[in-house]
Image (cartoon, grey):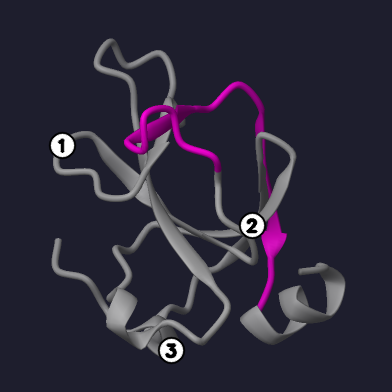
Amino acid sequence: MQPIDFYEVDDFREAGINGIPALFTEYRIDRNTLPQGVYCYEIRASDNGCSDFNTIENHVRVNFTGSVITRRPVPMHGGDFSEIYRYGLFDEMSYDEWLTQTEE
């Protein structure tokens, strides 16, 4: 799946990843098109199929589940990944709506 322009994403959903407010999409996002002050990460599913949200990483090549954007960096173990121990997906939400509801 080729990355798409951030402003072409039409399926954002409000999300929480390890207690961090986020927006989730099933697309890969072209990071060159991100608004300033936004971080983008990719979600990896587990190999055994028991979870679609196993780790959050800078780039996922296999078992890609989707992308999340956040307003603050996600701490990474060894700079490579962070295990997802808690997440939730909620209603559809636009980027502008999300900005008004989250703090930096």
Asked if residue 71 lies left or right of residue 73, the reply is: right
Q: Amino acid type of disc 1?
A: Val
Element type where label 3 sits in the image: helix
| Of the image marks 2 and 1, the number of the one nearer the N terminus | 2
Q: Label 1, on which residue?
A: 62
Classify residue 50 by image quadrant. Answer: top left
- Part of the protein shown in magenta: 75-94
Q: Amino acid type of disc 3?
A: Tyr
Asked if residue 104 lies left or right of residue 84, the reply is: right
Is residue 19 visible in the rendered image? The answer is yes
Instruction: State the residue at coordinates (58%, 78%).
Output: 37
Distance between mark 2 and mark 3 Cα atoms: 16 Å
Q: Position of residue 24 (x, y in %)?
A: 53, 57
Q: Amino acid type of disc 2?
A: Ala
Q: Label 3, on which residue?
A: 7
Task: Examine the structure image and report whether residue 9 is included in the region drawn in magenta.
Answer: no
Q: Would you call the spot at circle 3 few (<14 residues within 10 Å), some (14-19), or many (20 or more)?
A: few
Quadrant of the snapshot with the C terminus:
bottom right
Q: Position of residue 73 (x, y in %)?
A: 56, 55
- 14 in relation to 78, above or below: below
Element type where label 2 sits in the image: strand
Q: Label 2, on which residue?
A: 22
Element type where label 1 sits in the image: loop
Instruction: State the residue at coordinates (63%, 60%).
Output: 72
